[in-house]
Image (cartoon, rainbow, N blue to C red):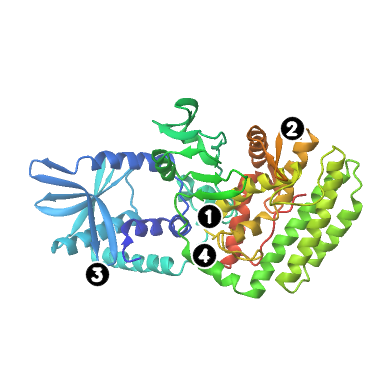
Amino acid sequence: MRYIPVSYLAEYLYCPRNLYLRVIEGIERKNEDMKIGEYQEERRQKREKVISGSREVFHGVEVASETLGLVARIDAVEKNGNVYPVEFKKGKRRNSLSHRVQLCAQGMLLEEYLGKEIAYGFIFYMASRSRVKVRFDKDLRRKVILTKEEVKKMLEEPVEPPPLKSSRCKGCSLREVCFGSEGVLPLERKGKTIYLTVPGTALKKNGNACVVVKDGEVIAEFPLKDLEGVVLVGRTHITFPLLSVLMERGVNVYFVKRDGSFGGMFIPSERKNVNLRMRQYKMHFDEKQSLKIARKFVKGKIANMKALLMRYNRKGEVLEEFIRDLRLMEKRTESVRSHGELLGVEGYATQRYFEGCEKILDKVGVKFDKRERRPPRNPANSVLSYLYTLLLKDIISALYISGLDPYFGFLHINRPGRPSLALDLMEEFRPVVADALMLYLFRRKILDISGDFKIYFGGCYIKPHARKKIFAVYEEKKRQEVQHPEFKKAIPYYRIFEIQARILGKVVVGLRKEYTPFIIR
């Protein structure tokens, strides 16, 4: 960075890990105190200059220094005979080194900008309604320089600091992330995902709400604060004003093609952890390390395929031969010596697994000879393809959130436009999320073969009204809590997607020895 924000120095002194999570990993979460502070600052900035007697006050003054390599937006600069910076803090008056260093750095920037000595400044604590005068002595100035060098080193050679585990953690907005088993457990999101499926409908902004419009008529309305994601299917639309607001709120927008395949996504901002992605690319080209991770993806997939068949085997199905073969293939993953051999093991295991699924579907009169995609030739394959698309969008999102590049994988071959790493991570979730839902939809007769599908030129396609049924059960499945084998607690699937992405990220940067796939019990 050419200029380091002065606020980074204060954050680093308060908690190095907080700065790392926010700046390096790009994790943002605002608590009530932060929102109040932002509101108070906005009110101050509306009055750029205030004159009171002989005192002039300038709000929101931006200064930068080539010499120091620092930049700041000073809350206020006052001229009253002397010139000095004023920093506003929302809380009660206290003796804080991070506050003093931040103010002193602002004073040093003003010195260079104005070409005159700035000897002191003030911190105004709003809860106490009191000012504290801070003198910029040699020791404090030296601390500014030393802290800047430490922050610069963190930015250039990121190493994740351990949690402080002190009393100051209580009010931190990132506490849940920081203490989530060393930064692996993600923040819980409770928003809703809108699926827009009817051709000709559009999403628009209306005040603080998102409205669904068809032929000029509003047919549904949702508060913007409740949105977590938007999925646009086929010939549906979204307006730019709404897209702009969703970007500010960090809401992802996904695009699904008419045939059910994944079209792409609009992400508000890519994660800032360049170091993580550089190590990901390096590990990709390391055959030994790449194969080590790829083995885990395949082992997790086979273990979960086996678990699903075992579940149905207890319901009276005759699936022992398929389960036995999967058990053998799961063990084989540990001894393969190349990606080609690993893909061969995965291919055979998948073939035997779908043969077992065929036996399960036979009992309810649903044809499923083999896995076919382009086009799917029967309802089971059509539903699987659609569920894989929904799952893929969530895995891509989890990887972006964790800072990894979804398009640079370890198992699947990299091709233009192919999210290889997302397909890698998706493997362990295919059986327990998508495949399990497909079997559920047909065995419970939620989908009707005669009325919910259409045959067109040999391909089998899901009708729009049937897609709504699939969306509903998929969203319900995402929020289903299951026991995570490592954390020994019930966690919704949508959070587990991100947990696994974060675990992978820790492996990539060397904070974990090996990747542990999510395997259901």
Residue at horizontal 82 percent and vertical 47 percent from the top: 357
User: Residue 13 sits in which quadrant?
Assistant: bottom left
Residue at horizontal 64 percent and vertical 66 percent from the top: 413
Q: Position of residue 343 (x, y in %)?
A: 74, 65
Q: Which residue is mark 1?
A: 400
Residue type at tag 3: Thr
Residue type at tag 4: Arg
Q: Nearer the viewer, mark 4 or mark 3?
A: 4
Circles 2 and 4 in contact, beta carbons < 8 Å:
no
Q: Residues within 10 Å of mark 2 (few under 14, many from 20)?
A: some
Work out whether 221 lies above or below 107.
above
In terms of sequence position, does the residue under pointer 3 or pointer 2 come before the other? 3
Q: Which residue is mark 3?
A: 67
Please state which of residues 1 and 161 is positioned toward the viewer in this rendering. Answer: 1
Label 2, label 1: how many angstroms apart (C-alpha)? 33 Å
Residue at horizontal 91 percent and vertical 55 percent from the top: 321
In terms of sequence position, does the residue under pointer 3 or pointer 1 come before the other? 3
Label 4's element?
Answer: helix
Label 3, label 1: how many angstroms apart (C-alpha)? 36 Å
Label 3's element?
Answer: loop
In terms of sequence position, does the residue under pointer 4 or pointer 1 come before the other? 4
Q: Position of residue 351 (x, y in %)?
A: 81, 57
Residue type at tag 2: Ile
Label 2, label 4: how many angstroms apart (C-alpha)? 42 Å
Circles 3 and 2 in contact, beta carbons < 8 Å:
no
In terms of sequence position, does the residue under pointer 2 or pointer 4 come before the other? 4
**Quarter of the picture holding the N terminus:** bottom left
Label 4, label 3: how many angstroms apart (C-alpha)? 31 Å
**Is any atom of residue 127 visible in this view?**
no
Label 3, label 2: how many angstroms apart (C-alpha)? 68 Å
